[in-house]
Amino acid sequence: MNIRGRGRQSGFTLVELLVVLAILGLAYGLVAPLLARALPGGDVGTARREIVSALRETRAAAAVDGAPAAFALDAEGHGWMAAGRHVKAPAGMALSLAGAPAARQGGRDAIVFFPDGSSTGGRVTARAGNAAAHIEVDWVTGRVRAEQP
């Protein structure tokens, strides 16, 4: 059988498949955050990631600066302060911190990290409706660990 004698075979080219995959990737990137917020607990997951990041950033700042650094909840528990910036929690979310009673900064509940890596320790809880996220900070090592919801 002669290969040249065949007619053109139907199918998709590699370029066409890559274009479709790129479009699907863009659509997912735009739709996924909207769906995460619409689902119960979506905001809690986002807050959990942001709080873990802020705690780790605060710990690193204490080590780099050679001075204690604090992660503090605001007075109403609707946001936090870390690394010189204030972050507001999404509407309807309550934040709480359970930790050492001595770890208060300016009348706010706080977790203080020390240059040697240790901390006052504590547990930050973000709650919205029935969904909750818990972030633990070990007082000896300063290690930040988030419990998966």
Image (cartoon, grey):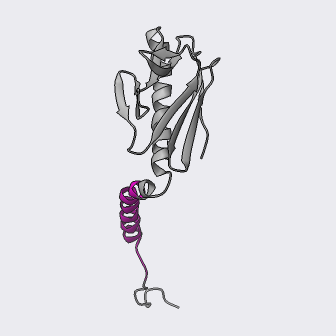
Location of residue 113 with respect to 25 vertically, above or below: above
In which image quadrant can residue 138 be found?
top right
Name, please, the residue furthest toward the top: 66
| Residue 54 relative to residue 149: left or right | left
Q: Residue at x 41, y 69 (%)?
A: 17
Q: Which residues make up the magenta segment?
A: 11-34
For residue 100, side relative to residue 105 (left or right): right
Magenta stretch contains residue 31: yes
Nearer the observer, 20 or 31 = 31
Q: Residue at x 50, y 50 (%)?
A: 129
Q: Position of residue 139 (x, y in %)?
A: 62, 19
Examine the rendered structure and indicate whether residue 120 appears above or below residue 86.
above
Q: Main secondary structure of the magenta part?
A: helix
For residue 133, what is the image quadrant?
top right
**Position above or below: 48 against 11:** above
61 or 140, which is in the foreground?
Answer: 140
- Residue 113 part of the magenta-drawn span: no
**Residue 105, quarter of the rendered image:** top left
What residue is drawn where x is 46% and y is 25%? 57
